[in-house]
Image (spheres, rainbow, N blue to C red):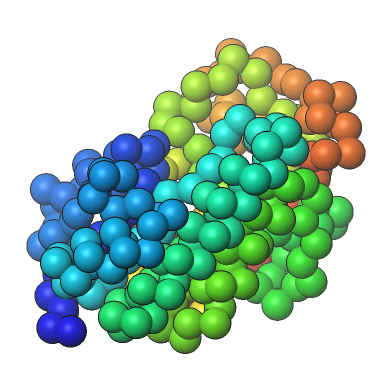
Amino acid sequence: MLKYNNRIVITGGSGRFANAFKKIEVNTSLKLYYPEKNKLDIMNIKSIQKYLKHIKPKYLIHLAGLSRPMNIHERDIAQSIDKNIIGTANITKICSKLNIKLIYISTCYVYPGLKGNYSEKSSLYPINNYAWSKLGGECSVMLYKNSLILRTSVTEKPFIHKKAFYDFKTNFIFHEDLVTKIIKIKDKKGILNIGGKSQSVYDFAKKYNPKIKKASARKMFGKKMPLNITMNIDKFKKLTND
C-alpha cells in the first residue's frame, strides 16, 4: 500500500490527549487525521481496514480506549477488555497487514508501584484492572515489530483538581508538552518510558497552583493504588535531547 509519509491517523480523536495533538497542527508539516467512531470503530476490523486503506497513513497513534473513571475497570470488565485489549488487538492486526507504524500509548501503571525508578526492562505487575487492560493491549502491539509502546503518565493542563496526592509519586507531564516529544520519536521502535520529572503529584501541581491542598492516595484508594510508579526516563531524555 502506498503510504503518505506526512500522514498520521490518531484514534480516540475526541479525547483529551487528541485535543492536545490538534493544537500543534499549525506548527508542523504533518497531516493529522482524527476519525470519528462511525469512520473507524476499533471494535470493527472492517471499518479499521477501510479507513486506513483510504487515508494511507505512515503512522497510527492509538489513543482510543477506556480510562476514566478508574473504577469502571473493576465494575465492568467486559467494557475494559473490549476497548483496551480487543480494540488494540484489532488496530494492531490492520496496522500489521498494511505495514503502518503503530504507536501505542500505554501507562506507567503496568509497573508494580512499590519502589519506583522502573526501567523499560523492569518486571511488570499491574496493581489494578485498568493497568491490566493496558498491559493486555501492549501484548498484541509487541507482536508487531513496526511499533512503539510509550509508557507514560499524563494529565490535563491546567491541573484541574483542588487537591493533589502527597504520597503518590509518578512522572506527570501535561498532554501538550508530551505531544511534541512523541512527534520527535515517532520513528523509534520498541518500548519507551516517557514523561516528566519523578515527583509526588502534589509537588508537580503546586508549581502551577501554590494554593493547592494535600490529599492522601493511600487513604482514598487503599491497596488499589500503587504509590510509587516513577519511571527511569533516561532513554527518553537522550532521544529528545532534554
In the image, is residue 171 above or below residue 85? Answer: above
Quadrant, the N terminus: bottom left
Evaluate whether residue 43 shows in this view: yes
Q: How many marks?
A: 0
Q: Residue at x 80, y 34 (%)?
A: 167
Q: Residue at x 66, y 25 (%)?
A: 164
Residue 220 location, quadrant = top right
* Residue 59, image x, y percentages: 28, 70
Evaluate whether residue 172 shows in this view: no
In the image, is residue 32 above or below residue 215? Answer: below
Q: Residue at x 13, y 60 (%)?
A: 31
* Residue 91, image x, y percentages: 41, 66
Residue 43 location, quadrant = bottom left
Q: Which of these two is toward me, 160 or 77?
A: 77
Position of 111 compared to 65: left or right?
Answer: right
Q: Which of these two is toward me, 38 or 127?
A: 38
Q: Residue at x 59, y 43 (%)?
A: 79
* Residue 173, image x, y percentages: 50, 45
In the image, is residue 146 above or below residue 39? Answer: below
Position of 13 compared to 228: left or right?
Answer: left
* Residue 101, image x, y percentages: 34, 76
Quadrant, the C terminus: bottom left
Q: Which of these two is toward me, 78 or 52?
A: 78
Residue 136 location, quadrant = bottom right
